[in-house]
Amino acid sequence: MKPLGTLRLGVNIDHVATVRNARGSAYPDPVRAALLAEEAGADGITAHLREDRRHISDADIDGLMAALKTPLNFEMAATPEMQAIALRHRPHAVCLVPERREERTTEGGLEVAREENRLAHFIAPLRDVGCRVSIFIAADQKQIEAAHRIGAQVIELHTGAYCDFHSEGHFDKRDAELVRLREMAAFAHSLGLEVHAGHGLTYETVGAIAAFPEVMELNIGHFLIGEAIFRGLSPAIAEMRRLMVEARD
């Protein structure tokens, strides 16, 4: 199967805010990082406004909506507070993610099958105001089917387990997870869902995911912000883009 189109790169700028908040200062500014990412060729910007505001703040979302020319992918928990913020700003895309206050980062995909009715009613107003609704989800057929039934337009496959197995040297488990991701990308596409992927991707792991013909967008953040310390944000993004294009070709 030929790729369905050009693979897009969404750059997550959450951890620019993490560095800023470590000192309680005004810098580094996530909005400035987002504009640099745009200049470097990012197709969109991702920002996760957590309930505890541990990195991105409400003011950051205000600034991003005002400054960006590329689409904003607004990651959020499925709570009334976050829904109200999304309805006020009307970003290009809303990605629903699971969220626990004690977690360091998002630890798994959203449980959709057990909360179908609630989530269907939750996303309807977001779709009504023009937001594309994405569900951050494990490579699990039951969850993908549920995401489709509730009216999501996009799923984002959680690549964290694949990346962890790779970094820990569990290559048999890594390869099995890669097969699962590939199969579920194809399955989601067969239902008419647009397929994205992300979480934990690095220069070493991005190629195998970028090669999936059904995947239309990768969202990458923590690694790029870390790599920017050593080579700068624009060169870090350019190298990720190069590897994505190479894998796609």
Image (tube, rainbow, N blue to C red):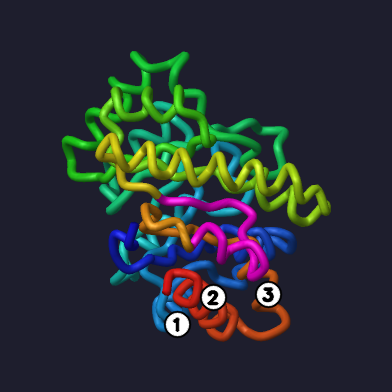
Residue 55 position, x and y percent, is 61, 53
Residue 108 position, x and y percent, is 61, 35
Residue 240 position, x and y percent, is 55, 74
- Residue at the image point whose x is 32% and y is 42% from the top: 189
Query: Can you see residue 86?
Result: no
Q: Is residue 140 left or right of residue 174?
A: left
Res 227 label: 3
Task: Give above or below for 89 relative to 34.
Answer: above
Q: Which residue is mark 1?
A: 40
**Quarter containing the C terminus:** bottom left
Look at label 1 and name its amino acid: Ala
**Stretch of the chain drawn in magenta:** 196-210
Q: 58 or 142: which is nearer to us? A: 142
**Circles 1 and 2: CB atoms closer than 8 Å:** no
Q: Which tag, 3 or 1, sits closer to the chain's start?
A: 1
Look at label 2 and name its amino acid: Leu
Res 243 label: 2
